[in-house]
Image (cartoon, rainbow, N blue to C red):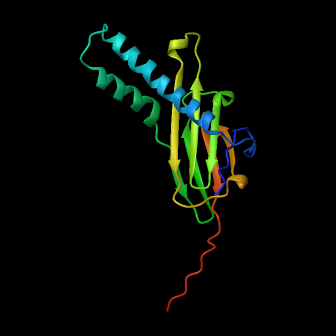
Amino acid sequence: MATQTALVIDSPVNVSKLYSLDEVSALLDSIHGAIQRRAHQYFEERDSRHGSDLGDWLRAEDEILFASAPLVALLDDQIDIRVDLGGCQLSDLTLGIEPFRMVVVGHTRTDVEEQDGTFFRLVNLPGEIDPLASSAAVHNGCLCVTLPRMQDTHKFILL
């Protein structure tokens, strides 16, 4: 099944490109680097004392990967998802939509590079959706995504 990827705009999702394996790898490296930088900040906040490396890493992972879980609403003909952007600007947001999952990656920027924030949300969908008919918009700092469900093409016959 083909993977569809989309970039967020203020109107319906514009499916503009597919990510190559190299681009996905670079994205994952970026997320790993953001976790690494945040863990090092925690280390420095503890006056660079050794002994809590794993705790710093897990705290950074939790902040970047798991903070503010998306809200998912299952409706008869669509799935609605809301993601708090935590100050992320629309221009620094990437939304990937596939038939069975959605990925949101955002970057918040400050004047100090070490304080830049990255977040990553992966939503495994409970059923197949139509990526090309999906729409997304940002309202009051929240990404609102509507994913039309695919019609059930399987017919079951009770014998």
Question: Residue 136: percent from the left, percent from the top?
Answer: 68, 45
Q: Which residue is drawn at 64% across and 35% down?
A: 94
Q: Which of 117 and 154 is in front in this view?
A: 154
Q: Position of residue 66 (x, y in %)?
A: 43, 37
Q: In this view, does 8 lie above or below 72?
A: above
Residue at the extreme bottom of the image, as rendered: 159
**Looking at this view, is 32 or 120 the one in front?**
32
Q: Residue furthest top?
A: 47
Relative to 116, is 21 above or below? Answer: below
Frontmost residue, 52 versus 111: 52
In this rendering, position of residue 33 left or right of residue 152: left
> Is residue 108 placed above or below 94 in the rendered structure?
above
- Residue 116 placed where, x, y %? 54, 18
Disc count in the image? 0
Kindly tell me whether residue 140 is visible in this rendering: no
Q: In which quarter of the image is residue 8?
A: top right
Report which quarter residue 17 is drawn in.
Answer: top right
Question: What residue sits 51% from the left and 39% below the top?
Answer: 121
Looking at the image, which is closer to me, 59 or 68?
Answer: 59
- Give the residue displayed 62% in from the left and 51% down from the top: 98
Residue 47, quarter of picture: top left
Q: In which quarter of the image is the N terminus?
A: bottom right
**Which residue ends up furthest to the front in the rendered image?**
22
- Residue at the location (59% across, 60% down)? 128
Query: From where the camera sits, is residue 98 visible?
Result: yes
Image-based side of 62 in relation to 6, left or right: left
Name the spot of residue 82 as percent of width and height, x first. 56, 44
Side of 113 relative to 67 (left or right): right
